[in-house]
Image (spheres, rainbow, N blue to C red):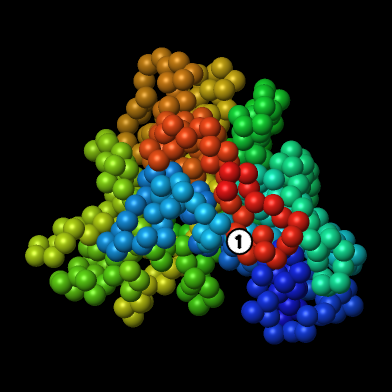
C-alpha cells in the first residue's frame, strides 16, 4: 500500500499541481516496474488504491460540480460566504471545485494499471480483466466529468512515475479528443468486465460501465450533435442494465438511502466508519449543541457536530413537496420547528452513522442506481419518438414516489414529456450530484437557474475556471475562456 501511495504522491507533484508541501520523499524519486507490478496482489492493491483516490476526488466536489450551481442550494443555519459564488454562478479560480489535482491523480493511477497489469501473470484471466476493466471505467468516468467541468483539458494516457520524464507540462486538449477517448475507454471496460448478476456495487461492473455508456451517449446526442446514432447506443447500453435481474427498483424510496448495499445501487463510492469518514455530507447537518431538547437528537432531528453551511433553498423545498403524496420529499429534506428555539432544516439522504454522540459521514455516494436507468430509458424513448413507451418508464418511478398507477395519464407532446422527465429527475436525485448536468442536457439551464437568466452569451459560463495553482505551476495551461 505504501508503494501505491507513493505513486499517487509522485503523480501529484509532477503533473500540473502545486502540492509539494505534502510530500516526504526526494524530488527525483522514481517508482518503476522494478519496485512493484510483479504479482496479482500488486495489481489488486493498485486497483483499490485507484478507487480510493477516485473517492477522495469526488467526496466533496461531486456535489459542488453536480448540484451547487443549479440554484437549488443556499445557506444552512450558518452562512458561508465562499459558497455564495457557487450558488450565484460567479465562480473564480480560487474555488475548491476549480482544482483538478485529485482527479488527475486518480487518472494517473488508472494509467499505471493499464500500463503494467497486462505484463503480470495471473492464474485466472478474469481477475486480470476485472482490474483492467475498473481502470478503464474509472478513467472514462473521470475524463467524462473533467471535460464537462472545464471543457478542453489535458489528455494524459501514460502514467507518470518520475519528475524527469517527458510531457510534465501538457496543454489543454480539445473536448472532441477527450470525449473520443472516453468512448474508447468505456468500450474497453464493457468488453473486459465479466457478465454477472449485479457486480460488487462498490467497484465497477459491466452494468456500471453500461450506465456510464448511456450517460455519455445521451450527452453526446444532445450536447455534441451525436443525433440518432448516439441515442441508439445509449438505448442499447441502458437495455443491458434493465435486463440484469440483479438490480431492482426498491419499493420504499427511503430504504435506498438507509442501506448502502441494496439492490437498486449499481455503482457507489464506499464510505465505512472505520476506514474513511471524510464524508459527503459535512456541510449539511445541524449542529447538535443548538438543540434544546436533547431527546430530539436522532429521534426527530438528524444531528452532527459540524456547522450546517448548506441546505436546499425554500423554493426547492417547496418544489420537492409540491405533491403531498410524494414520499421522496421527506427523505430529501426534513424539518422540525423546536418550540422556543428555531426551525431546523436538513438534507436527509446522507445521515451516515451516529455513534457515541459523533456523526460519521459513512453514507455512500450513489453515482448510478436503477432508478436512473429507468429515467434514462424514458428520456431515450421520448427522443426516439416513442412517447407511449417513455410514459411507461416515467410511471414506474412515479408509482413508487406517489403510490399511484399511471400517475401521468393522458397524451403528452415530446416537449411536455421532457419537462415531466426532468422534473422527476430533479426530485428523484435531489442532492445526488445530477441536477446541474440534467438542466444543461435538457437545454433549460438558462431558463431554470435564476442566476443564469440572460447570461447565455457569457463565454465559458457553464464551465469552471482552472485553479490558480495549476496555472502557476504549468506555464502551458491557459485559463478557461471567460475567466
Residue with the most extreme left position? 340
Q: Is residue 149 above or below residue 297?
A: above
Q: Label 1 belongs to which residue?
A: 468
Q: Give the quadrant of the N terminus.
A: bottom right
Residue 342 visible in image: yes
Residue 124 visible (yes or no): no
Name the residue nearer the viewer: 384 or 327: 384
Residue 93: percent from the left, percent from the top?
A: 56, 57
Number of other residues with Cα within 10 Å of mark 1, as a class: few under 14, some 14 to 19, many 20 or more: some
Image position of 238 with respect to 329: above or below: above
- Residue 69 percent location from the top left of the image: 45, 47
| Place of residue 189 in the rendered image (x, y in percent of width and height, measured from the top left) | 75, 49
Numbered disc total: 1
Determine which quarter of the picture holds residue 50. Answer: bottom right
Quadrant of res 182:
top right
The residue under the point 60% across, 59% down is: 467
Residue at point 26% right, 72% down? Answer: 288
Q: Position of residue 390 (x, y in %)?
A: 50, 24
As drawn, is 210 to the left or to the right of 161?
left
**Position of residue 62 in the picture relative to residue 307 (left or right):** right
- The answer to whether 206 appears left or right of 188 in the picture is left
Tell me if residue 361 comes above or below residue 322 in the rendering: below
Q: Secondary structure at mark 1?
A: helix
Q: Residue at left 72%, top 72%?
A: 13
Q: Residue at x 41, y 66 (%)?
A: 282
Amino acid at each position: 500500500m505504501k508503494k501505491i501511495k507513493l505513486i499517487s504522491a509522485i503523480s501529484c507533484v509532477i503533473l500540473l499541481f502545486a502540492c509539494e508541501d505534502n510530500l516526504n520523499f526526494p524530488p527525483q524519486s522514481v517508482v518503476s516496474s522494478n519496485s512493484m507490478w510483479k504479482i496479482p496482489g500488486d495489481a489488486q492493491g493498485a486497483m483499490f488504491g485507484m478507487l480510493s483516490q477516485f473517492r477522495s476526488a469526488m467526496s466533496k466536489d461531486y456535489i459542488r460540480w453536480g448540484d451547487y450551481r443549479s440554484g437549488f442550494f443556499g445557506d444552512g443555519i450558518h452562512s458561508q460566504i465562499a459558497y455564495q459564488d457557487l450558488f450565484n454562478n460567479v465562480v473564480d479560480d480560487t474555488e475548491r471545485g476549480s482544482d483538478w489535482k485529485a482527479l488527475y491523480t486518480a487518472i494517473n493511477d488508472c494509467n499505471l494499471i493499464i500500463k503494467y497489469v497486462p505484463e503480470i501473470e495471473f492464474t485466472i484471466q478474469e481477475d486480470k480483466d476485472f482490474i483492467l476493466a475498473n481502470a478503464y471505467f474509472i478513467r472514462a468516468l473521470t475524463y467524462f466529468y473533467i471535460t464537462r467541468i472545464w471543457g478542453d483539458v489535458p489528455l494524459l494516457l501514460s502514467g507518470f512515475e518520475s519528475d524527469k520524464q517527458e510531457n510534465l507540462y501538457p496543454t489543454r486538449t480539445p473536448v472532441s479528443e477527450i470525449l473520443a477517448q472516453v468512448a474508447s475507454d468505456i468500450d474497453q471496460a464493457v468488453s473486459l468486465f465479466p457478465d454477472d448478476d449485479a457486480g460488487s456495487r462498490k467497484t465497477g461492473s459491466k452494468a456500471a460501465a453500461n450506465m456510464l455508456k448511456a450517460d455519455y451517449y445521451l450527452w453526446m446526442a444532445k450536447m455534441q450533435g451525436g443525433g440518432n446514432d448516439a441515442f441508439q447506443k445509449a438505448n442499447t447500453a441502458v437495455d443491458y442494465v434493465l435486463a440484469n435481474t440483479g438490480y431492482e427498483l426498491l419499493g420504499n424510496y427511503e430504504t435506498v438511502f438507509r442501506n448502502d448495499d441494496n439492490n437498486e445501487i449499481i455503482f457507489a463510492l464506499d464510505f465505512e466508519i472505520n476506514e474513511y469518514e471524510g464524508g459527503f455530507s459535512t456541510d449539511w447537518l445541524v449542529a447538535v449543541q443548538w438543540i434544546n431538547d436533547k431527546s430530539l437528537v436522532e429521534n426527530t432531528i438528524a444531528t452532527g457536530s459540524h456547522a450546517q453551511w448548506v441546505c436546499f433553498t425554500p423554493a426547492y423545498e417547496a418544489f420537492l413537496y409540491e405533491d403531498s403524496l410524494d414520499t421522496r420529499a421527506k427523505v430529501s429534506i426534513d424539518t422540525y420547528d423546536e418550540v422556543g428555539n428555531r426551525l431546523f432544516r436538513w438534507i436527509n439522504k446522507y445521515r451516515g452513522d451516529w455513534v457515541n454522540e459523533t456523526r460519521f459521514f459513512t453514507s455512500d455516494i450513489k453515482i448510478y442506481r436503477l432508478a436512473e436507468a429507468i429515467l434514462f430509458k424514458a428520456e431515450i424513448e421520448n427522443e426516439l419518438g416513442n412517447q407511449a413507451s417513455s410514459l411507461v418508464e416515467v410511471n414506474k418511478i412515479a408509482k413508487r414516489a406517489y403510490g399511484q398507477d399511471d400517475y401521468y395519464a393522458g397524451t403528452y407532446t415530446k416537449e411536455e414529456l421532457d419537462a415531466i422527465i426532468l422534473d422527476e429527475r430533479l426530485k428523484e436525485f435531489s442532492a445526488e450530484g445530477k441536477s446541474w448536468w440534467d438542466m444543461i442536457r435538457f437545454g433549460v439551464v438558462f431558463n431554470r437557474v435564476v442566476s443564469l437568466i440572460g447570461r447565455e452569451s457569457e463565454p465559458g459560463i457553464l464551465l469552471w475556471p482552472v485553479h490558480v495553482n495549476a496555472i502557476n505551476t504549468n506555464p502551458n495551461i491557459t485559463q478557461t475562456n471567460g475567466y
